[in-house]
Image (cartoon, helix red, strand yellow):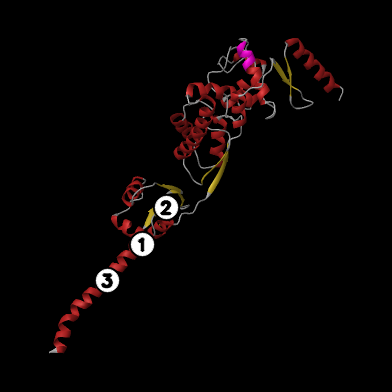
Amino acid sequence: MKPQRKQRWMPWINLAESLAVLSIIALVYYLLLPVSTPQTLKVPRGSMRSIITHLNQKGMELSPLDAYLMRIVGTPKEGWVYLGKKTMHRIDFLHALANPKTHIDKITLIPGETLAIFFKQLQNTYDLNATQLMRHYRRYSPYPEAGILADTYFVPHGIKEKPLIAFLVRTTEKRYRRMAQKAFGDYNTTRWQRILTVASIIQKEAANRREMPLIASVIYNRLKKRMRLQMDGTLNYGVYSHVKVTPKRIREDNTTFNTYKHRGLPHSPVAAVSKAAIDAALHPAKSDYLYFFRNKRTGAHDFSKTFKAHRRNIKKAKRLNATK
């Protein structure tokens, strides 16, 4: 009787073993399925369900089985994940989410540079589109220019236009808010744009950081007397960032950036500014200076209170340069 009972249960045992083997094969097949991925991916904070929903919205096509596998492989870490490949096996993808690698790029916005030139540089260096960068900037920043503080930023390699601009503007806005609250007690974008506009002219005109407060004093002194600023740096806006200002350009440019024609400040900042330029705009030197010019011999500016003294300094500098 015992041999018969053993023989009767054998088919069921074989079936269970077969199903187990098939399940393992199916699981291995599923884990090796290719997943299309971007080079970098941001994993949000939240529950496993919300993370999977977010990743599905990004085109990852994850299933409830992936939620189970994530608990085995490891919970996805919040933040940017560098994936590097356009496709990878599902098991490698899940492992990368739990054990992220970060490949960082260093991006530097030079003080005095314009967004038009900066975005073109990003396009030429990274796989980014300058037009899209500008479009997202217009959406996120309240300022036509200077909405990204001149500084060095570290960003995930392969980051796309929208998240890059969102990060740069958000980081800048936090710093602007702190500076404005310290100076004025609150952060008002209309008032702050005026500070940024003055700072951008300082940035364009100053030969070094030390003379920035003096340049600021000249700007405020001329504005107070309703004198035109008459500064070349204001005409180095947008695509004209590195274009020499000529008499022809001064005659033909009818924008508010032409401070030879327009009285007062330009309608918006000229270029990106540094914290030092903002500090100078907030805390100008106390002086009676109304004029300055670049002394080629020293590389810095000579300042004067009257036009007569200004002309005298220019002639003196020319004589000294001629005798060298």
Q: Amino acid at mark 1?
A: Ile
Residue under label 1, please give it: 72
Residue under label 2, please give it: 77
In x, y percent, where is residue 37? Answer: 41, 50
Circle 3: element type? helix
In x, y percent, where is residue 45? Answer: 38, 47
Question: Callout 1: few (<14), some (14-19), or many (20+) C-alpha neighbours within 10 Å?
Answer: few
In x, y percent, where is residue 127? Answer: 51, 42
Question: Callout 3: few (<14), some (14-19), or many (20+) C-alpha neighbours within 10 Å?
Answer: few
Tell me which numbered mark, 3 or 1, is placed earlier along the sequence: 3
Quarter of the image for residue 27 reads bottom left
Residue under label 3, please give it: 20
The residue that appears at 30% across and 54% down in the rendered structure is: 63
Instruction: Tell us which disc is closer to us: 3 or 2.
Output: 2
The residue that appears at 53% across and 29% down in the rendered structure is: 182
- Looking at the rendering, the stretch of residues picked out in magenta corresponds to 220-224
Q: CA distance from mark 1 to mark 2?
A: 14 Å
The residue that appears at 45% across and 40% down in the rendered structure is: 163
